């Protein structure tokens, strides 16, 4: 049995080796701290995907993070349609109010002929800039890269070229994914299941996942369920992690058979942190249980 790590956003400039070392260091420490007998030596191999530079390059033309946070003038109409509802939910999660958004909307102007969602997107971005500018940039980056991956076949295919080879070995593999990496991993596992490939995942771990965001979820054709090649799916989220907009993946959005830990406590500094997620005892225990 193998294990694969699939990273999320903001990893550009790193490498697969760096991701592997960072995640293994955290996970090994968690096994020690939780007094769990470290099972990783029983695996035939552990690999990390790396697509951060590629996705940053291909999605940057679609979404200029700081420019959007400061006024949402750079977004395409297609991105507006994809992001406006999710961004509003994120803004409310960050502490904005409906009144703040409505007040900003009444004062927002857009160029004549702009798309129907442009005014909403611009208003919400400005509210986020006021209450939590750093979180706003992160939220827009998540949505921008998710939009590029889901809606642009070229981006989707180029990212998958870098990640899919790790999944192509017939030996079963535990998949541990974070943030945008949960979308990429789910996409590839669905692809194998649809094609009847024997590649099996005894455990699929999704941490801080944006899969529950409606515009992201609907980017996948039906049926949106746990693929047959996933034997166990464990989803973990911090309630304050606004990237994991819906902390539970349930029957209503991804069908039955998903174990949810929607109450992970990652602290106030960075609720989306992979370091904090991999330090969660229940996640470490699930990984240990899946290694014979």
Image (cartoon, rainbow, N blue to C red):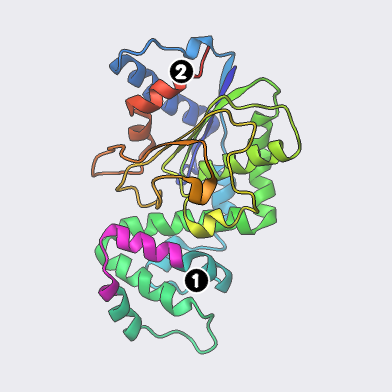
- Specify the principal SS of the magenta part: helix
The percent coordinates of residue 289 (x first, y second) are: 46, 18
User: How many other residues sit within 10 Å of disc 1, few (<14), some (14-19) or many (≥20)?
Assistant: some
Q: Kindly state the secondary structure of the residue where label 2 is placed.
A: helix
| Magenta-tinted stretch | 85-100
Mark 2 or mark 1, earlier in chain: 1
Indicate left or right for 264 with 187 as reference. Answer: left
Question: Image point 58% across, 17% down: which residue?
Answer: 45
Residue, disc 2: 289
User: How many marks are shown on the rendered structure?
Assistant: 2
Residue, disc 1: 74
Looking at this view, is 205 or 33 the one in front? 205
* Image vertical order of residue 173 relative to residue 106, above or below: above
**Any mark on residue 50, and which?**
none
Is residue 25 in the magenta section?
no
Looking at this view, is 255 or 54 the one in front? 255
The mark closer to the camera, 2 or 1, is 2
The percent coordinates of residue 2 (x first, y second) are: 58, 20
Q: Is residue 211 visible?
A: no
């Amino acid at each position: 049995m193998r294990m694969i790590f699939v990273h999320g956003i903001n990893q550009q400039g790193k490498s697969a080796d760096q991701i592997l070392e960072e995640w293994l260091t955290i996970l090994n420490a968690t096994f020690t701290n939780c007094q769990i007998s470290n099972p990783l030596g029983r695996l035939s191999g552990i690999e990390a995907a790396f697509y951060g530079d590629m996705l940053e390059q291909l999605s940057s033309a679609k979404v200029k993070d700081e420019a959007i946070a400061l006024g949402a003038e750079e977004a395409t109409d297609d991105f507006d349609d994809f992001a406006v509802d999710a961004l509003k939910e994120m803004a409310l999660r960050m502490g904005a109010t409906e009144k703040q958004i409505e007040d900003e909307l009444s004062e927002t102007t857009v160029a004549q002929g702009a798309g129907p969602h442009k005014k909403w997107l611009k208003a919400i971005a400005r509210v986020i800039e006021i209450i939590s500018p750093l979180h706003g940039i992160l939220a827009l980056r998540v949505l921008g890269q998710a939009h590029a991956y889901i809606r642009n076949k070229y981006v989707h295919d180029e990212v998958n070229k870098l990640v899919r080879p790790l999944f192509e070995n017939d030996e079963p593999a535990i998949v541990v994914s974070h943030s945008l990496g949960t979308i990429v991993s789910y996409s590839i596992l669905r692809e194998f299941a649809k094609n009847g490939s024997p590649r099996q995942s005894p455990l699929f771990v999704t941490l801080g996942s944006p899969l529950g965001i409606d515009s992201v979820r609907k980017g996948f054709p039906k049926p949106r369920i746990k693929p047959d090649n996933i034997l166990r799916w464990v989803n973990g989220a911090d309630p304050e992690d606004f990237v994991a907009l819906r902390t539970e993946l349930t029957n209503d959005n991804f069908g039955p058979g998903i174990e949810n830990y929607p109450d992970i406590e990652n602290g106030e500094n960075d609720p989306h942190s992979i370091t904090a997620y991999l330090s969660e005892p229940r996640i470490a225990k699930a990984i240990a249980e899946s290694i014979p």
